Image (spheres, rainbow, N blue to C red):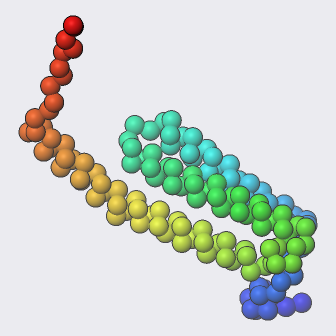
Amino acid sequence: MTSFFSPSYWLTLSPPQVNGTIGHLVFGFFVLCFVVGIVSRIVASNRTEDKYIEKIGQRIGTLFVTMGLLGVLLFFFSFERVSLFGARFWYPVWLIATGVWAFYIVRFIRRDVPAMRLRDMERKAISKYLPTGRKRKKRRR
């Protein structure tokens, strides 16, 4: 038995055993990610008045739906003992990819959303001084 922290444990092509309680917990986690993603997308599109909150919810929902599906697929390959696609090293890759994607979402929330709000407020302040198009009445012939 190799150590959990050794590279030979993670860089082997043999899939991990996903039977038992740990396997059920991992599968449940991936399914929970998928369900949270769907709920997040639905709530963000239906319940928000603010378009930026909607964009944030859509991005978070996309993250959870995608990673939940990839996780279930990874679990399936591990369960079926497929050598390459069910290998152990995909689990840390999945975790790193989720972390990087979450980092970009947080960066969007902290950097881009305030800039977009400021830009919209400036446009709104300027637009009140700009002329608007008049509605023309239709002529009857």
Say if 82 sits above or below 48 in the image.
below
Q: Which picture quadrant has residue 21? A: bottom right
> Residue reaching furthest top?
141
Q: Is residue 8 above or below residue 43?
A: below
- Quarter that holds the N terminus: bottom right
Query: Looking at the image, how many numbered discs can be counted on the residues?
Result: 0
Nearer the observer, 114 or 13:
13
Q: Residue at x 21, y 7 (%)?
A: 141
* Along the viewing direction, whichever of 138 and 51 lies nearer the viewer: 138
Q: Position of residue 112 (x, y in %)?
A: 34, 61
Image location of residue 26, percent across then percent down: 78, 64
- Residue at the spot x=19%, y=11% of the render? 139
Note whether residue 29 is visible.
no
Task: Answer yes or no: is residue 55 visible.
Answer: yes
Q: Nearer the viewer, residue 75 or 1?
A: 75
Q: Is residue 40 left or right of residue 104?
A: right
Is 3 on the left-hand or right-hand side of 107?
Answer: right
Q: Is residue 134 left or right of residue 74?
A: left
Question: Which residue reaches farthest front?
Answer: 141
- Residue visible at 87% across and 81% down? 14
Q: Tell me the residue at 47%/67% (across/down).
A: 104
Question: Measured from the top left, where is residue 94 in percent x and y?
Answer: 67, 71
| Up/down of 89 relative to 30, above or below | below
Percent of width and height locating residue 77: 84, 68
